[in-house]
Amino acid sequence: MVRFSVSQEGLWSVKKSVESHNHELARPDDQHLLRSARSISEDNSSVLKSMTEAGIRTVDAFTYLSDEVGGVANLGFTKRDAYNHIQKERRAKFESGDTNSLIKLFKERAIDDHMFAWDVETDEDGCLLNEKHDQRPY
């Protein structure tokens, strides 16, 4: 642990330094699991996105990428990171303009299924505020 202070002139000075740790440091074999060492490159992101959009499960896309680089330790991210990345991409896609597609889908569904009821509200940017769907009892 290191504690710093900054003077009014902008000079940094060390106030306290403790060189011992209260835990073991990560072994070199485990460093790829540390959050600070993990990231998904643009190339891997593109492959994950393409494969999942083609209907391939995220776990299978992750396995493919790890096999390509000789194992998970060489990949640079975990399976959970891959799932989170895909979910983030899907949310961003939905938030950035899929509202019109959703409304169109609901209109088509209402034509085919007279028991399907829906209502949506959008803000001034066309982003979805809330939704109500299929009011049939379960």
Image (cartoon, rainbow, N blue to C red):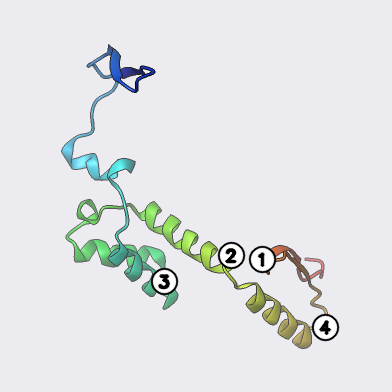
Residue under circle 1?
Answer: 127
Residues at marks 2 and 1 touching, judged by CB atoms closer than 8 Å:
yes
Q: Earlier in the sequence, mark 3 or mark 4?
A: 3
How far, Cα to Cα, is label 4 from label 2? Answer: 28 Å
Q: Say if residue 1 shows up in the picture.
A: no
What residue is pinned by disc 4? 114
Q: Amino acid at mark 4?
A: His
Q: Is residue 13 left or right of residue 109?
A: left
- How far apart are the two marked residues, 1 and 4, measured between alpha carbons? 26 Å
Secondary structure state at the residue bearing disc 2: helix
User: Residue 95's mark?
Assistant: 2
C-alpha gap between disc 3 and disc 4: 33 Å
Residue 106 position, x and y percent, is 72, 78
Label 1, label 3: how far apart the Cα atoms are: 25 Å
Q: Secondary structure at mark 4?
A: loop
Q: Amino acid at mark 2?
A: Glu
